[in-house]
Amino acid sequence: MRARAEAGANIAFIKYWGVRDQRLNLPLNDSVSMTLDVARTITEVEFSPSLSADVLTINGVSASQAALRRVSRHLDLLRERAGVAWRARVASRNTFPMGAGLASSAAAFAALTAAAAGALGVALDGAEMSRVARRGSGSAARSVYGGYVWWHAGTDDASSFAEPLAPPEHWDVRDVVAVVAEEEKKVSSAEGHLLAHTSPFLRARLAQVQRLLPRVREAILRRDLSALGPCIEADALAMHFVMMSSRPPLFYWAPETVALLKAVQVWREAGVAVYFTIDAGPNVHLICEAEDVERVVARVRRLEYVRRVIVAGPGPGVALQETA
Ligand code: PMV
């Protein structure tokens, strides 16, 4: 009973921040993202009667107890469905740094869901796969699909799942990730979501999200970066203001993050069509169209404080792979 699946990270244009139900990972707002082609996770799951406990390795290294517990809980959801009690060996590999603003948990739980369901012979359609992936990490609900994806917040387990908005071929947008720090973040997004309610700016952000969502949808469908860009910047800033004004406050930014935001302003004034967004970390995602990517990458590489540049485009959704 073995299967392997691959999934991509995603970058949100309208962010998910704050949960209304922690156990089910029901978000406070709808979110919209692009699944990435290069930041991928490949996970193999093998259920076996000879194992007395689940075993988890990430990039070949035995994972922490906390990570193992989270994965075991997720496997339980699928074990229950399949009526199987067997424990599993889970081996996961990432093609990108973990915990630093690239949503590694999204790719991880999308791949884990597909591989575990495949190994157990549980048939899940896209919406069901998205719902189960959501339980592991909210943003994983979106990584089930490729290209441009909309996650309906919903009000309960059944109504909260993602749907494709447009396939990867629809629009060649690039995410140039300017990595300024590769350490794992100190406060996980799972903990951060619980603090959103303590910010006096939460209401204002959620009201803004309602105004931005239809504009983001239209901009994606019309392939209009000049309409999309200001919306994604507004929402990324609003999300970080909620984070910073939570009690206790969450500062994911580094000084280099602010320097990059200012650089983007200068580049735009010089005629380069590039916009920023930032996840729960200090790295800055520079969003542009394929035709401008060389110009953006050249500028980012000139900044001595940028440690690494990752260029991603729209990628496919989760898929099972052949196992030998
Ligand atoms: O899925 P989580 O719990 O890792 O939350 C993701 C949160 C952000 O990356 C900051 C925003 C998003 O929508 O991806």
Image: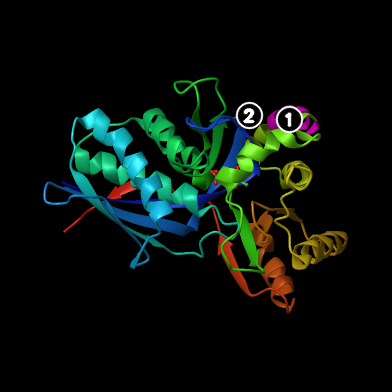
Magenta-highlighted residues: 204-215
Q: Is residue 207 magenta?
A: yes
Q: Nearer the viewer, residue 28 or 63?
A: 63
Which quadrant, please, contains the C terminus? Answer: bottom left
Q: Tag 2's secondary structure?
A: loop
Above or below for 285 versus 16: below
Mark 2: few/some/many CA within 10 Å (<14, 14-19, 20+): many
Q: Quadrant of residue 274?
A: bottom right
The residue type indicated by label 1 comes to Leu
Q: Tag 1's secondary structure?
A: helix
Name the main secondary structure of what is drawn in magenta: helix
| Residue name at image x 60 percent, y 57 percent | 101
Image coordinates for residue 125, horizontal then vertical, percent: 34, 30
| Residue name at image x 52 percent, y 42 percent | 139
Q: Are marks 2 and 1 in contact (CB under 8 Å)?
A: yes
Q: Which mark is residue 28?
A: 2
| Residue name at image x 39 percent, y 55 percent | 65
Q: Is residue 146 left or right of residue 111?
A: right
Residue reaching furthest left? 50
Q: Is residue 314 left or right of residue 295?
A: left
